[in-house]
């Protein structure tokens, strides 16, 4: 079997990508040294927060050869996940929580990886000497920078990859190959222009400059990656977001006419499309895992997810939640007890009932966790301010 040419291999990769459901694809060179330097600057400024995995083995991100020594070229693919069932209501006064659209459907990692391996299999049928490795968020690769080099799009001011047709609602997959392949033309134009909707509409001011996000302020980071308490000064700004956030995508003009996904797997599931906060806060660990099995929501962990729900409950300011909060104030997780105290105080701003204060004072007499004690004392202070 003869080897196919670099140009023919480029064309075949794009044909196979389309065949296996990827709307966009391109071939990129393997050096990311310049992009790596920008990444290191971002890390060194502390913008990664507590995401230690982003700081480890950082040098591997400078070249794909460090990921797999046989790498000569990279096939980068994109697949749309946008649904026409838009979750665009931004009000925080709601009995329901919001989940980022990418997490409303089934998990994408295995789905994309299987299709990348099918592409590799067909490439090997053309040339048996072809080898490859597939990655979907599983290696220290600067995926968005690589996608720009492959011609898939440009980095928007919200730091997400933007494509003129698909907008930003698409997943990225990477197939490293051991063959020199003709590169696609890198995407050099930025089509954001003077638009700064994403920067202006971010409720926590996480986009501190075009293409630079301080993860420590980003709702997606706070509700997914952060394992401890959510900073008090950001809680009221989170509204009813309980897993991720799409605001900077929803307001982007390039997403207005983006097509709907052709993959049923990515369409919203009933359990993630419109979810009741009262039911969610009562999920035990087993029920949480069963309800969200096969979705990205499990990444938040049970205690982290309940923490997020409590912030949304506090931001609802609805007294109907108070009886449930009295129960969660006794939860086995300190993280839940502390955020319950905060939520009670937020709702108490709209209510004036002595028993609310008594519930917190009663818990304070038996609480052992120092952070929870601090949260209860701060909550009592807030309630006292209202009483004056």
Image (tube, grey):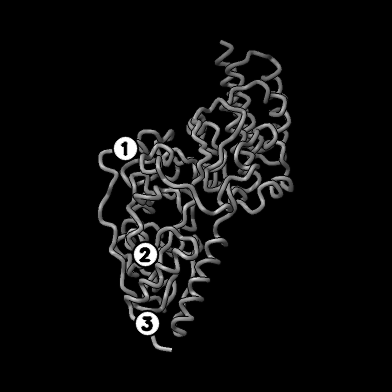
Quarter of the image for the N terminus: give it.
bottom left
Q: Is residue 328 left or right of residue 181?
A: right
Seen from this angle, which residue lies furthest top?
388
Distance, label 2 to label 1, CA atoms, is: 28 Å
Mark 2 is surrounded, within 10 Å at the Cα level, by few (under 14), some (14 to 19) or many (20 or more) other residues, namely many
Mark 2 and mark 3: span between their CA atoms?
18 Å
- Marks 2 and 1: which is nearer the front? 2
Q: Earlier in the sequence, mark 1 or mark 3?
A: 3
Residue located at (40% from left, 40% from top) = 256
Check disc 2 and report the residue beneath it.
Answer: 26
Q: State which quarter of the image contains the C terminus.
A: top right
| Residue 319 in picture, x, y percent from top left | 65, 20
* Residue 46 visible to an observer of this rendering: no
Quarter of the view holding residue 181: bottom left
| 176 horizontally vs 328: left or right | left
The mark found on residue 367 in the picture is: none
Helix, strand or loop under label 3: loop
Spatial CA span between label 1 and label 3: 46 Å
- Percent x, y of residue 252: 38, 40
Label 1 SS: loop
Residue 101 visible here: yes
Residue at 34% in and 61% down = 36
Q: Nearer the viewer, residue 174 or 337?
A: 174
Residue at 58 percent across and 33 percent down: it is 311
The residue tagged 1 is 196
**How busy is the neighbourhood of tag 3: few (under 14 within 10 Å), some, or many (20 plus)?**
some
Which residue position is annotated with label 3?
Answer: 4
Label 1, residues with CA under 10 Å away: few <14, some 14-19, many ≥20: some
In the image shown, does 39 or 380 lie closer to the viewer? 39
């Amino acid at each position: 079997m003869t080897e196919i040419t670099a140009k023919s291999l480029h064309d075949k990769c794009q044909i196979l990508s389309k065949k296996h459901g990827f709307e966009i694809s391109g071939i990129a060179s393997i050096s990311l040294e310049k992009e790596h330097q920008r990444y290191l600057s971002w890390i060194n400024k502390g913008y990664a927060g507590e995401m230690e995995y982003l700081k480890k083995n950082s040098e591997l991100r400078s070249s794909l050869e460090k990921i797999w020594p046989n790498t000569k070229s990279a096939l980068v693919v994109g697949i749309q996940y946008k649904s026409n069932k838009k979750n665009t209501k931004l009000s925080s006064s709601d009995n329901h929580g919001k989940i980022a659209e990418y997490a409303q459907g089934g998990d994408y990692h295995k789905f994309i990886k299987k299709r990348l391996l099918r592409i590799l299999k067909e490439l090997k049928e053309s040339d048996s000497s072809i080898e490859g490795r597939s990655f979907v968020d599983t290696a220290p690769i600067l995926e968005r920078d690589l996608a720009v080099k492959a011609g898939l799009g440009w980095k928007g001011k919200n730091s997400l990859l933007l494509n003129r047709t698909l907008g930003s609602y698409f997943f990225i997959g990477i197939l490293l190959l051991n063959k020199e392949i003709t590169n696609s033309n890198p995407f050099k134009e930025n089509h954001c222009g003077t638009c700064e909707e994403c920067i202006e509409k971010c409720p926590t001011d996480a986009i501190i400059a075009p293409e630079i996000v301080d993860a420590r302020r980003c709702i997606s980071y706070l509700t997914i990656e952060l394992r401890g308490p959510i900073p008090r000064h950001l809680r009221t700004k989170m509204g009813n977001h309980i897993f991720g956030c799409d605001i900077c995508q929803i307001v982007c003009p390039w997403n207005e006419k983006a097509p709907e996904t052709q993959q049923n797997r990515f369409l919203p599931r009933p359990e993630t499309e419109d979810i009741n906060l009262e039911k969610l806060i009562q999920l035990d660990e087993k029920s949480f895992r069963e309800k969200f099995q096969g979705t990205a929501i499990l990444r938040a962990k049970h205690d982290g997810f309940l923490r997020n729900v409590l912030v949304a409950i506090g931001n609802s300011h609805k007294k109907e939640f108070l009886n449930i909060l009295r129960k969660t104030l006794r939860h086995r997780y300190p993280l839940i007890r502390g955020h319950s105290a905060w939520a009670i105080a937020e709702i108490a701003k709209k209510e004036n009932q002595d028993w609310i204060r008594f519930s917190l004072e009663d818990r304070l007499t038996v609480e052992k966790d120092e952070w929870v004690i601090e949260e209860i004392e701060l909550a009592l202070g807030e309630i006292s301010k209202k009483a004056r």
